[in-house]
Image (cartoon, rainbow, N blue to C red):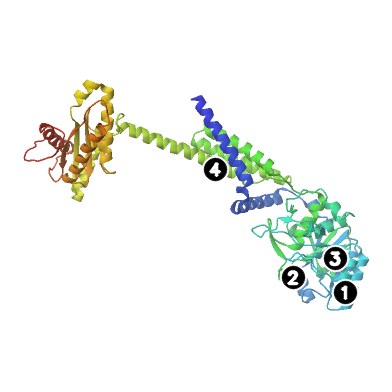
Amino acid sequence: MIRKSKRHTGIAMVITMTACLIYVLWVSHLGPFNLLSLKITDGFYRAGSILLSHDSLIKEIVIVSIDDESMNKIDERWPWPRSILAEMIQKISADGPAVISLDFIFRGKGADRPDDLTISQVIKNAGNVIIGSYFGSAGRQTILNDDIVKSAKGTGFINNPRDADNVIRRTKPVAHSASRNVIGYSLAAQTAACARDKTAPDIISGLPRMKDGAMRIQYFGKIDRFKQVSVWNILNGKVPPGTFRGKIVLAGATSELLHDSHPTPLGIMPGVTIVANETLMFLTGKHFSYAGSALNFAILLIFTIITVLAMLKLPLLRGMMASLFGAAAYFALSLGLFLKGFVIEPLGGIFLILLAFFVIYSRRYITTVIDNRKLEKEAVTDGLTGLYLYRYLELQIKRELEKSAEENKPLSLLIYDVDHFKEINDKHGHEFGNTILRTVSKVIKESVRSHDTVARYGGDEFCVLMPNAASHDAKRVAERALNNLKQKASAIPEIVSVSMSAGIVSTKDHSPLNAADFVKAADAALYRSKSAGRDKVTIFDKTIDKPA
């Protein structure tokens, strides 16, 4: 018993290891599982925004909002004349910011050439302005105004890869050409580099990235966590001196009219706020690290094996509690590591533990059902022949008699008796007699329909209950069984022949008072077969046969 238990445990461990490996290498990458993992991760992001305070870090950034008020008051079609933007940059620059980052694009020449010259000069004088760029679907960078680009400290692209559900959770700090040459750095990386007086390659050097070169964005907060200043207030001198001094200033659209808002784990967020979070990530070094396939597999395996070992020894209710505890512990670990900046696959442990619970207890239930069925069958079947015992047949006769009466359909009962069975036993022994009985039972079972009930009536007597069959139908079955038995017996070298006699009764021939009366009628017909010389089939005749 102990050896069998160890064997089952060993098999469970092998299955668990295989399931963990399949999950990490294949299942976790399937669309539904990947999407559900992302949604769980979004919950972690929201938990982090509540549990963690980043106010001291967020204060380093000021967002200059092209908001609804500015759009209404300035009353110019977007993009605004570059003279307005030049004035905005000039007033911000005069307050001494660490860097001015523009989350919009100066595409080509402006409407007025003088405005291009003006803004180019203002940007050049500031000396710390980063302007945005964009890579189109074909991988080509937006054509920017050359004069403005040359005046700026640098340019940075504002593209972000999107996940399957269109949510922005990742950033690519560097863009490569098809030949893997660097063709640009992100606006956030360039902004952080300028603020720290470094280069973009220095800022992103050594940061852990995914296989595609992307990084998961560390979201420090939504726009309401950042200090915001309206462009309109800047242009009208309503901003207190020192507001921008030493700060990282990010200017971008927050007005809904400009459609620069995107889905993020923390909800819909203006593009400039996404850049602000990315910039803080590069500045603070609070980025995410990622568990590779090997580590994910190891963590999943540890949690799942511990839970499986517990469930193998526990009853259903306690096993359920163990699985829920294991899943909750894995969830808590995933969340705790996420808040510390380390990402593991968040769904795997929960899925595999709950799957293990379902498999273990389903198998246990199915095994119990099968064992119970075996016990039930053993309780109503004969151990030697595998046929039903007479007490089961008696119940079936009672049910079928009632059904026959209700539906007005015939019901027939056959009784077989092996001829001269006592002599066979005495001559060849009981073991040989048992062989004959097994042969007879097999012959009878092969001769009937699948829904007929075959039972062992006594030592060498057998019964067949045939619903919806008249006496002549039963007679054909009985004669076929007698002929088949002779053929089977001829293959047994110890004896010359084995035969049997049969008696048949049908509800059309006899109206039984009960199950016992029905059996007595068939037995009377059998008695007439044996009296007439055996190896015969006799149908009950109420004028001749008298049930004892």
Provide the residue designation for mark 2. Answer: 68
Q: Are marks 4 and 2 in contact (CB under 8 Å)?
A: no
**Which tag, 2 or 1, sits closer to the chain's start?**
2
Q: Nearer the viewer, mark 2 or mark 1?
A: 1
Cα distance, mark 4 to mark 2?
51 Å
**Which tag, 4 or 2, sits closer to the chain's start?**
2
Mark 3: amino acid: Val
Helix, strand or loop at disc 3?
loop
Badge 3: residue crowd in 10 Å (few <14, some 14–19, many ≥20): some
> Could you tell me residue 118's position as x and y percent?
90, 73
> Could you tell me residue 212's position as x and y percent?
73, 53
Helix, strand or loop at disc 2?
helix
Provide the residue designation for mark 4. Answer: 355
Mark 1: amino acid: Asp
Helix, strand or loop at disc 1?
helix
33 above or below 160? above
Q: Which mark is residue 116?
A: 1
Q: Are marks 4 and 3 in contact (CB under 8 Å)?
A: no
71 above or below 157? below
